[in-house]
Amino acid sequence: MATIKPFKGIRPPRELVEKVESRPYDVLSSEEARAEAGDNEMSLYHIIKPEIDFEPGTSEYDPKVYERAAQNFKKFQERGWLVQDKEEHYYIYAQTMNNRTQYGLVVAACVDDYMKGRIKKHELTRRDKEEDRMKHVRVNNANIEPVFFAFPDNEVLDQVIRKYAATEPEYDFVAPIDGFRHQFWIISDHDDIDLITREFDKMPYLYIADGHHRSAAAALVGAEKQKLNPNHKGDEEYNYFMAVCFQASQLTILDYNRVIADLNGLTSEQFLEALSKNFTVEDMGTDIYKPQQLHEFSLYLDGHWFRLQAKQGSYDDTNPIGVLDVDISSRLILDEILGIKDLRSSKRIDFVGGLRGLGELKRRVDSGEMRLALALYPVNMKQIMDIADTGNIMPPKATWFEPKLRSGLVIHSLS
């Protein structure tokens, strides 16, 4: 069962939400956060990217930067830029991109569910990134930013969401950077709150879609607090962390593409010949070509786009990992031909989220920065859930969810 609870959210007043809200901490650099915050002292970047309060070049991992986050979080509350709700609520958060809206339930998810595998992950996490977010949670004693979960489609929850979506939202704005619409409702009816809790209780698992490091950090800090409290009972607020849960069928997963700096000593002709061992290779000309189906790839090289179709026998349809296009391309192109063994550490490869389009791949190759580009057909939620259910881990840089959750709409205190 998936254990969730409502919580007393810490939120900006309606008239200040567009001053406070921000992009998540991990999608922009310190310099970009500094520029976006500008002279807006209410920007959440002063809490989630507090290095912008110091001289340019100050490390985001400097102890004084974490301390500044806590000071700013306290200041935001003292000045009324963030105010805690008096009652426990669930919340609904809707995002509209390209005329398509997805609705998420904002809940407090259970630390024990994460530790015991009832909240399933599909990616590896790095301990240094976990520790960074753990420090941020510890110093603020709060989950400032939510994590992004998926759950199997549920008609009862869908009806609850639709009921509230037909009413006036608490927040309704178009974000200036991404151009997407963001809406937010408060669920205060006790019957609806109880119904939501019961429906989640029927679910065997929840699935992390995006935010693996934030999930790990939040759960680990909660587990720390359990051990440090000699009077721990299990109902303390630190036993929970904030998540936005979306029905799986609503989520949009974009392609996550690759640009590579060199051909590993091969000529273009030798590289294309090597590809023909495991792929049919077709020159599609100079117009941008996007993969149309699973096991089809698009390659940009020397001003031409090539269609690559993986040959039968080059992948295993019965293996939830081996059937993934990200695994096929990693094994048969990046590793076998180009000699790129570790996608996480190699300096010869970079990754481009699908929202930027294949034109960005072309630009980076044509500029001379990169030698070739590889576009993949996107992973789907069923593949992600199958991998999580079988206890497997996806290869690095396999998924790109869009739109990203905005930060600052609601915060969860651990006390």
Image (cartoon, rainbow, N blue to C red):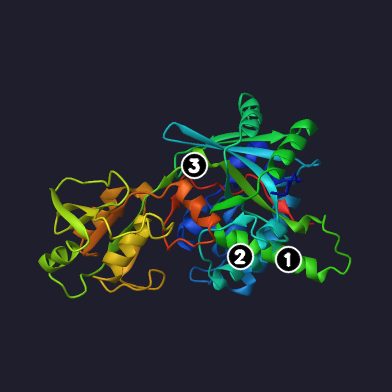
Element on which disc 1 rests? helix
Q: Which numbered disc, 3 or 2, marks the residue that appears first in the sequence?
A: 2
Label 3: how many Cα within 10 Å (few below 14, some 14–19, many 20+): many
Above or below 209: residue 17: above
**Residue 64 occupies quadrant:** bottom right
Task: Report whether residue 195 is seen.
Answer: yes
* Element type at mark 2: helix
Nearer to the camera, 79 or 401 = 401
> Which residue is tagged 3?
251
Q: Which residue is mark 2?
A: 133
- Residue beneath the point at 55% across and 68% down: 129
Image location (x, y in percent) of residue 115: 67, 63
Disc number placed over residue 301 in the picture, else none:
none
Above or below, 47 against 61 in this view is above
Q: Residue 342 sits in which quadrant?
A: bottom left
Instruction: Write down the residue under mark 1.
Output: 223
CA gap between label 3 and label 2 equals: 25 Å
